[in-house]
Image (tube, rainbow, N blue to C red):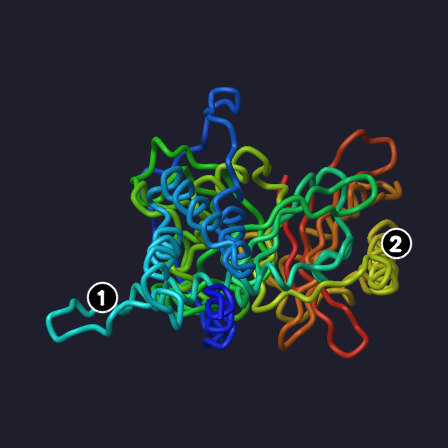
Amino acid sequence: MALLGLLVAALLAGPALAQGSKSKGKNKARRAASTVPAAAMAPLRDGQAEERLLQVFQLTGEGRTREALASAERLVRDYPNFQLAQLALGDLLSARTRPLQRLGDVPAPTAASTPSSATVLEELRTESRQRVVAQRARPTENSVPSQFLELAPRYRHAIAVDAALSRLYLFENTSKGLRLVADYYASVGKLGIEKVVEGDQRTPLGVYFITSRLDPASLRDFYGSGALPISYPNALDQLRGKTGSGIWLHGTPPGQFARAPQATDGCVVLSNPDLERLLRTVEPRSTPVVIARQLQWVQPHSIQAERQSFEAVLDAWRSAKTEGDMQRLLGFYAPEFQGHKKKPLTEWAGVLQAEARALRGREIQLKDKSYLRWTDTVDTMVVTFGEVADGAQTGPVKRQFWTRRGNRWQIFFEGVIG
């Protein structure tokens, strides 16, 4: 059997990435907003190394081993810190003298071997399997993750992470909707996903936003080309009592091209060339990041009814606020509601009354609306909009978290974000 046939069979037969776990990112020092102009940066090389590695696998599977070996040698020369490419090259060289049974077909560890060597080899096999499986499981054309019900034009990009596939997807928000422009291998927490407490080495699941862009000059080499912090814990996490902070999208140390699928303290880690694409592309504060156990891909038209149904609820909230009908307005708020600075509903009612008085009978319009849906044990809608009164040019940008109980949506968090 050709090497890649063995290779892919071994990859696909191996255990899938563990799910149902969580991870935590410890506080990082020396944070600062990046000020490096894009023009000063080197040309982008995102995705090239993986594409070339998969071509090596394909050539090998087709029996074109000489071409595969030459391609692997060039790949290792261009990316000497790419351990998985080094392993593939070693296999191709070994295959010239003996048949191989699996990726990284080396003699069994001896008593003198370091325990870490077997662990590293297995991690590389898992990484290879994740890359191959993700290539075969690419979403169909024009499909989007089900969480993205509606994104306003001001949200120019969006990110989704599929932990089961070790994959991060980058979208551009165009006039025709979301368009997938790139996807990358990514690592998550050592103990998996669904973060709960500080230090649990799990990556959170949910809907977040990039909060800033950190200059690599302000960071240790460990974080590679830079970092993009996200807004964990969000309002739903806080309602559930989850703790921890410092969850970032970041790169790898100079000597390491990629990390194992589960290798971080809770962050999402990409190779430096891939992260550099994100650093140059996405905008802090207006780029949503969905991290899911496994993404569900849908055609945009299939979620139109859900979007319209929720929009009717939001419009009813807007109407009640415009009319100053406090009884009806407060009916949209959940008993466990917490507003900005953790104000309970009893205090928030005073805020709503003051806002209604300030309107002086003017109607409010909701501009640049975005709806992001998160469903696990409960159904949650993360809503962002600009609230503008008639006659005004601008107004506050607000974010609400709604939860559905039966057929009824209620707000459990509301705050001004801009």
Which residue, given by chain and number where applicable, does mark 1 sit on? Answer: 116
Question: Which residue, as the protein is rendered here, is positioned at the far top?
Answer: 39
Residue 140 position within the rendered picture, expressed as x and y whole percent measured from the top left: 74, 59
**Is 88 left, or right, of 385 in this rendering?**
left
Question: Foreground residue, 335 or 16?
Answer: 16
- SS for callout 1: helix
Label 2 to label 1: alpha-carbon separation: 62 Å
| Chain-order first, disc 2 or disc 1 | 1
Is 214 located above or below residue 290 in the figure? above
Residue 286 position within the rendered picture, expressed as x and y whole percent measured from the top left: 63, 41
Residue 319 position within the rendered picture, expressed as x and y whole percent measured from the top left: 88, 54
Question: Which residue, as the protein is rendered here, is positioned at the far front?
Answer: 97
Whether residue 325 is visible to the viewer of this picture, yes or no, is no
- SS for callout 2: helix
**Is 148 left, or right, of 299 in this rendering?**
left
- Characterize the local packing of mark 2: few (<14), some (14-19) or many (20 or more) Cα atoms within 10 angstroms: some
Which residue sits at x=56%, y=68%? 293
Which residue, given by chain and number where applicable, does mark 2 sit on? Answer: 319
Question: Foreground residue, 412 or 214?
Answer: 214
**Is 80 left, or right, of 41 in this rendering?**
left
Amino acid identity at mark 2: Ser
Which residue sits at x=53%, y=64%? 163
Callout 2–callout 1 Cβ contact below 8 Å: no
Amino acid identity at mark 1: Ser
- Characterize the local packing of mark 1: few (<14), some (14-19) or many (20 or more) Cα atoms within 10 angstroms: few
**Where does the C terminus fall, quadrant-wise?**
top right
